[in-house]
Amino acid sequence: MKFGVTGKVLRVDLTERKHQVERPDDTFYRTYFGGSALACHYLLKERGRIENPLGPENLLVFSSSPLVGSGIPGANRYSVAAISPLTGVYGEGEAGGWWSPELKRAGFDAVLVEGRAERPVYLWIRDGEVEIRDAAALWGKGTGETQNIIEEQTGTPNVRVAAIGPAGENQVRFACIVNALKHTNGRGGMGAVMGSKNLKAVAVCGGLPVPFKDKLALKQMIKWYADNFMDHPIERVLHDGGTIGWDVTELDEAGILPTRNFRSGSFEKAEDICGNSFHQKYFVEAGGCQACVVRCKRVARSDGPWKVDPAYGGPEYETAAAFGSLCGVSDLEAICKAHELCNTYTLDTISTGVTIAFAMECFENGLLTSKDTDGLDLRFGNAQAMVSCVQKIARREGFGDLLAEGSLRAARQIGRRAERFAMQAKGQEMAMHEPRGKGSLALAYALSSTGANHTEGPHDYLFQPGALGVGDLHEIGILTPTSAIELNPDKVRQFTYMQYTWNLFNTLGLCIFTAGPGKLMKMHQVADAVEAATGWDTRLWEIMKLGERTVTLKRCVSVRQGASRKDDRLPDRFFEPLEGGLLKGRTLDRSEFETSLDLYYDMHGWDRNGIPTPGKLVELGIGWVNLKSTH
Amino acid sequence: MNVTLRPIGLLKPYCDGLIDDQGRIELADREGQTLERVCREIGLPEGLVSLFIVNGHPQSGAYRLQPGDDVKCVAVIGGG
């Protein structure tokens, strides 16, 4: 008997309107678990290089994990993965909420979606039964209406729906997927892949039991977490203020709040968009995900000129900064509105904000004029123009059609060296963290197989001398703290191990806010939780190797798509001085950066071109991966 | 001469009752003490402060206070 999993993977062919159920063996589950690693397994086993990510040949994977549904706080997430239409390499987005545990109760650990439906459809999965349903009445609708109509059509109140809105239907290259109106598989354009397949939604509901091996041990861990999380400084901060409450002011003081398209590290109106302002003006209540006591989500409401609907949640830090300081906008209500629109239309708030900031810088430098922007005065600080851009992008309306391609493609269309204003890596826009002030973040942005990604590992300030995360590294063999801003061999080693932890979490369906270095649940406790859920005699070694396997599997998918060292780049801006803030004048050093890439590849068992070596693939138990014909 | 200490953002609730209307804590007789010790004694959780800015310049927690110092304490966490 298997524990922690349903033992079933659903494969749906939309072209043929068929589905089948597969039953992987124990070795499969213990090697790939779920989430990212499971998705990579299928992309590598079943696909060669995919030329058109928006074509029917792309494989779209929804993947839960053995830990999900166990009740362990934060173990409620899932990955959606495919070749990204934004980057052309591996793409994925992770989301919390209730969808992932519901998928398992509905009978499946993962859903593989192939082909392309002739007309819009949605998947209805209930207690092991699968229907491909007509979605004509849903097409063109936002996530709120979609949720309501599916509830009505299925006769199931609170059915868990992962859906796309108009942005996904219009194949905006950074369209996301939203479940329950507020939990997003944000990055990589997975919503556009759904749109390209004419797949409007995946609705799940179930009451099937998922067996967990040691329920008593799990119960004890859950109780321990609930009893202790408010005594852990970071968990308490997350509970009390959410991510919007822990970053804007702090990063501004540190000189690393991305401002006006990463030109500066300090925003003169940071106080207007910070957590304190949010909680005073627009906060309704805290929200959360399945089985999580931290409840870090925030819900916003306003009856002011922008009229913000609380049904769509509220902005995280990333969203507040992307539409705020990065666009020079200090109107927090407009930022909340932009957030609401993104969750309605299904747009990734990070890529949307960065692409708008890119356009603003082009406008201020004369590369775009009001003739190009449908009359919008697209200067930094214009909140009305920022919100208008969100709507235009989602609808691919006028100027929005250009921005819907993402900052890199838009820059290439604009020409005249506009690429220097596109803050992206591998085509994916940077998140709201400044690599000139966080050494390992520079590596994360450049080296992530998905393109710029801030969730490759915990951030540098946690591991400064005296900081909270330093002691948590001892159990994985890192004994000395590092300076946040430096990029040196010790930092590369630290980043390597940290990358294993957060990539592991994407494979376990575990939230980075409840566990890992700097959080309450330590890595050996994560191993204990896996053992209790699955019955496998798992130890720290095995899960760290799973994290490493995940990193290399993702790399292999991107390498197969043509990625190599040439793509592990950062925009030139980061090698130029920051214009303002505490770190004014700070640059990344090109020589240190290149040396760090060499070291990183060496540590990972990849060659100096960034290609995983055959020996490393065998060592990780994935020797079947064939990269010979890719370079 | 006093030392001025300013907990930033999320650190403020830990110092309720100590902070004045300007968001400052005025500390007397702290000359020579380390920032780490002072933070601990005013109730800031150990390890949460990851950046000290003294008179506009970053310093470590081992920095020893001098008369007239103006100190910002920042919890830089990041991510999400």
Image (cartoon, helix red, strand yellow):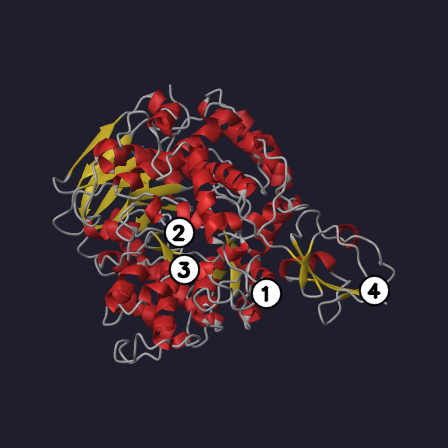
Between circles 3 and 4, the one closer to the viewer is 3
Q: Amino acid at mark 2?
A: Ala
Identify the mark at residue B67; answer none if there is no mark: 4
Disc 2 designates what residue? A452
Q: Quadrant of residue A334?
A: bottom left
Residue A216 visible here:
yes
- Residues at marks 2 and 1, CA–CA distance in whole angstroms: 29 Å
Residue drawn 71% across and 47% down?
Answer: B46
- The correct choice, above or below, for A240 with respect to A579 in the image is above
Disc 1 designates what residue? A276
Between circles 4 and 1, the one closer to the viewer is 4
Dot 3: within a 10 Å radius of its alpha carbon, few (fewer than 14), some, or many (20 or more) residues? some
Q: Amino acid at mark 1?
A: Asn
Q: Amino acid at mark 4?
A: Pro
Q: Amino acid at mark 3?
A: Asp
Mark closer to the chain start, 1 or 3: 1
